[in-house]
Image (spheres, rainbow, N blue to C red):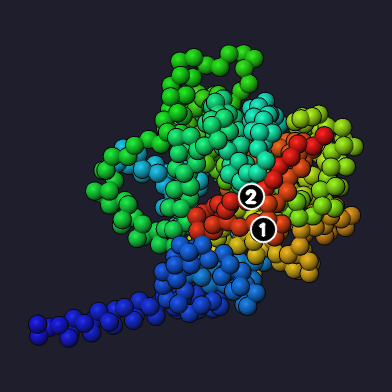
Amino acid sequence: MAYLPYITSVLVTLIVYRLFTNWAHLRQAPGPFLASLTDLWRAWYQYNGKLRGELLKLHQQHGPIVRYGVRSISISDPSVVNVVYGSRAGFTTADSYNVLIGISNGKEVASLVSTNDEARHGALRRSVAGAFTQTNVMDYEPHVHESILELLELLSRKSTMDLAQIMLYYTMDSAARFAFAEPLGCLASGTDVGGSIQTIRDRFNHWGWWSSIPALERLVYRNPIALRSKRALSSMAATAVKKLQDRASKPQATGQTPDLLTRFLESSRANPDVLDKTGIIGMLMSTISGAGDTTATTVNASLYWLMKHPDALARLRQELMDAQIDRPVPQYNQVSKLLYLNAVIKESMRLFPTAVWPIERRVPEGGATIAGVQFPEGTSVGCLVIALHLNPSVFGQDAQQFRPERWLTEDADMLKKMEQAHMGFSRGRRVCLGQHIAVLQIKKVIPALVMGFEISLVDPHAELKADFSPAVACLEPLMVKVQRRR
Ligand code: HEM
């Protein structure tokens, strides 16, 4: 007992020393004092879905560099995009990605997204890249087409509905179709079949809630006891395993619409050391998970702003009529190059990007100078996509407004500047692998919907809202009225 005051003072000294070194680490960067002492500050805001909004405010207050954690820096300056994400820059993913690493049979199994081993990431990505090129994704168009027909059929039976939910059913069914040629059945049943959507959202929640404190996540979920606990396969993973087993013994016949599974099996035969069976299941899961909420949110955002801006909707419909697109669903080659459609989608992604917090990268050995500030090795730096997208120095004083026409400017320099600041699909080595499939899905479904239906908000003042606590923005319900157009 006599030692108690002594032990207490040693502990207090150690804590004060730790807090001081935390603060001193990046003291050159402005930000909330609490955030410089402990990562619990950012964890709290992220858990409550408020980090994104708080960082936006901090950027307005302090400028392009803001500190939001002991070693975390948020950036809103588009000129640094290439410094951080450029292919040769040497930045790797930050520790926040570690909480996404899966656990299988008591071992950690990193996926394409969660691995911080850049050599492995590069090899894995190269091995499957052929399945995602602009030309090759055209092979999957029949899968997407079929899902849109099913969506339209469902809509024609409704008068009011939650657009956010129905669109997620479309993107998930479509993703399962182009992944392994079978829909999840969400559109057919009007439900989240087998809880697949919830399983994915649980993963996004886990990533979001623990991203700020990965060391604590490791202690709780990756200790030897937790690692050994049995985990049931999700219904979607079980379907993917079954499909893989079936396909290994009975490959797709000539004439069948190819899917990602066929392409991954081809890649696996060519690169068995890089992509094994577990890797194929991982890739299928990563693509379906990455394809659902992201694509649905972009379609919803586009439709929302078109509902709010009848002039833009009229202009889009005119463009689609002039192009004489097929009804009820256009062929991709009829819509892929339509300028106004493209501008509407770009503008919607600009105003409602799906990445929630800065896309974090780790400063490599030797440190780096970013926006004129020197940061030591190990600092996590990342562009906050929404801050970049609302930057008035790039997008002008009306940066907060939905104005697709800004993407039709004849000022080539201006256009280049805006393109460089657009990070909806991220940038660099880890740029969205599925972006061409996403664009295919979006550019086919929006014309089908706006030509086939009058869609209007049940509450004309309704706002587009999302939960920003998971890693990917998850839309809140958006009630709309639908009526077939003649
Ligand atoms: C509008 C829809 C989409 C948006 C906005 C979007 C956005 C993004 C972003 C921002 C990243 C980078 C994440 C990071 O570095 O932390 C990413 C990565 C990725 N996306 Fe997408 N995505 C979309 C659709 C899709 C689709 C349809 C697929 C699959 C077919 C897909 C598959 C992937 C994969 C596999 C990665 C990881 C790439 C890598 O690490 O090398 N995404 N996406």
User: Is residue 129 visible to the viewer in this orientation of the structure?
Assistant: no
* Residue with the mark numbered 2: 479
Instruction: Say which quarter of the image contains residue 237.
Output: top left
User: Is residue 358 visible to the viewer in this orientation of the structure?
Assistant: yes
Q: Give SS at disc 2.
A: strand
Q: Residue at x 82, y 60 (%)?
A: 414
Q: Earlier in the sequence, mark 1 or mark 2?
A: 1
- Specify whether 213 is left or right of 413: left
Residue 187 point in image, percent of width and height: 58, 33
> Between 321 and 288, which is closer to the camera in this rendering?
321
The image's mark for residue 60 is none
Instruction: Say which quarter of the image contains residue 228.
Output: top left
Q: Residue furthest left?
A: 1
Q: Residue at x 57, y 30 (%)?
A: 188
Q: Residues within 10 Å of mark 1 (few under 14, many from 20)?
A: few
Instruction: Say which quarter of the image contains residue 176.
Output: top right
Q: CA distance from mark 1 to mark 2?
A: 9 Å
- Specify whether 320 is left or right of 377: right
